[in-house]
Image (cartoon, rainbow, N blue to C red):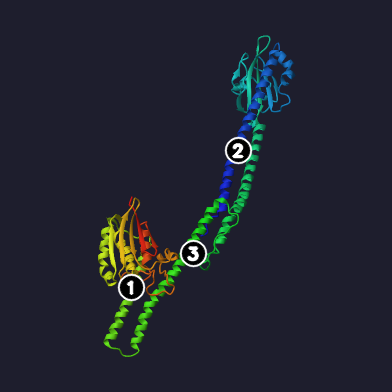
Amino acid sequence: MRGRSLAAALALAFGATTLAVFVLVGSFLYLALEKQIKAQDNLDIVLAARHARRLAEELDSAQGIRDHSERLTSVVLGNEALSMEVFDPDGKRAIEHNIAGALAVPDAASDAATVAGLPPLTRVAATARITEADLGDWTGRGGAPIRGIFTDARLRNGDTASLLVARNMSDRWRLLDRYRDKLNMAGVAGVVLAMLLGYLLIRAALRPLRDIAASASLVTVNRLDTRIAVARVPSELETLVASLNAMLERVEHGFQRLSRFTADLAHDMRTPLSNMRGAAEVALARPRSVDEYESLLASNLEECDRLSRMIESVLFLARAEHPQFVKQLREFDAGQELAHIADYFEGIAEDANVRVRVSGAASVTADLELFRRAVSNLLANAIRYTPPGGEIVLDASASADAVRVTVENQGQPIPAEHLERIFDRFYRVDPSRSSLPSSGLSQGSTGSTGLGLAIVRTIMELHGGSVHAQSDARSTRFVLRFPRAR
């Protein structure tokens, strides 16, 4: 199942973000415009009401209202949305201008209209200041939204007239509706455009990833040396490219080591099998005596033992590389264990005319069986390459951060270029691959599997420690370093 497009997902996220921003900005602009329009209209109504009352206060009587109607209605002239209605002291309409539609009552347009037919508005006293707080809202004829002020005016003769100044807000709501629709259209168009441009920009920004994928697809089993090379990689992807190249390098080295290991294993297993087959073919070429057949069986048995040790070593290395390999760590005296190992090899050392001496003492925390195996491998190797009459020293010493176990023997020095590689599996210092290579290591006294030093290094890695070799004309020393337990 194909995964979701990252570019599409980011474009959608970018579009959603843009939509949210447009909604917030559009709402702010809409509300700001509505507030500004409302404030301006309120001010117009208040100023018109104040002006009309001031003009009415200059009149002498109710008849003066009718005689000077044009003067009073001039306050709202020029604005079709504004309307005015003036009532005489008796409550009857004296003047009206553009009042049709402002009032919902049926008699709003008749001469008999009175103050009683007006909407329930707060009546501003003649002596009170007209403010925006005195404005009222109601619904006019046809459902039109109306806003206005109802105020009294004191005539010169002492009578009180009433004035209604109102404004039809329908044009304002239509203006706001059109503005809102344009905002919505602009928002939708902006979101679509933002998503499209975002998608194109994101695809362009992700091009290095596609180049990395294309470069990685060139890596095959036959081309493990290929590395990801992308020109002008963004700084955010430099770490990714470096990590992928490092991974490919580790894979290449691992594959090469596995190939060498497989070839060396096949070569070393072929040798004893060839020996067994050759000896059997020679024995079957003509009748042999019982002693000759026994000698053949003994020789074949030695080759079988060699194969068994090799297979056991390979299985151990395979198990040791598994992440869940179990170690039984415990604390013990390294000096005492070295003495036990020396006693076990006493017979083999006497046969080789070699002395084994143990010195030092230190407490170490390790897997006892793995410790014995590592030291035994090194000791068997030392016995094989120590000249007759020589001495092997097993030493244990402790420092602040580690415990060191040293296996030192006299003999021919190992060339410096081979000191690190002798711990590789099946590595041979002698290119002829002799049966007793200088880097080989056996589990006993007969022949080498070429895996002993590799096993030693694996054991030390399991303990978080290390092993290294030193060799000069005086002696060859293998040093095991076990870290202190914390």
Q: What is the x, y in percent for residue 465?
A: 37, 57
Q: Would you say 68 lies left or right of 482 here?
A: right
Residue drawn where x is 35% and y is 86% of the image:
282
Q: CA distance from mark 3 to mark 1?
A: 30 Å
Q: Would you say 455 lies left or right of 18 here?
A: left
Residue drawn where x is 50% and y is 58% of the image:
246
Q: Earlier in the sequence, mark 3 or mark 1?
A: 3
Q: Nearer the viewer, mark 2 or mark 1?
A: 1
Compare residues 76 and 440 and report the one nearer the observer: 440
Residue drawn where x is 39% and y is 77% of the image:
271
As drawn, which residue projects farthest toward the bottom?
286
The numbered dot on residue 436 is none
Q: Amino acid at mark 2?
A: Val
Residue, disc 1: 308
Q: Amino acid at mark 1?
A: Ser
| SS at badge 1 | helix
Asked if the residues shown at circle 2 and circle 3 are in contact, with their CB atoms under 8 angstroms apart, the answer is: no
- Residue count near mark 3 (Cα–Cα under 10 Å), binned few <14, some 14–19, many ≥20: some
Residue, disc 2: 25
Q: Quadrant of residue 305?
A: bottom left
Q: Would you say 338 lies left or right of 54 here?
A: left
Compare residues 67 and 480 and report the one nearer the observer: 480
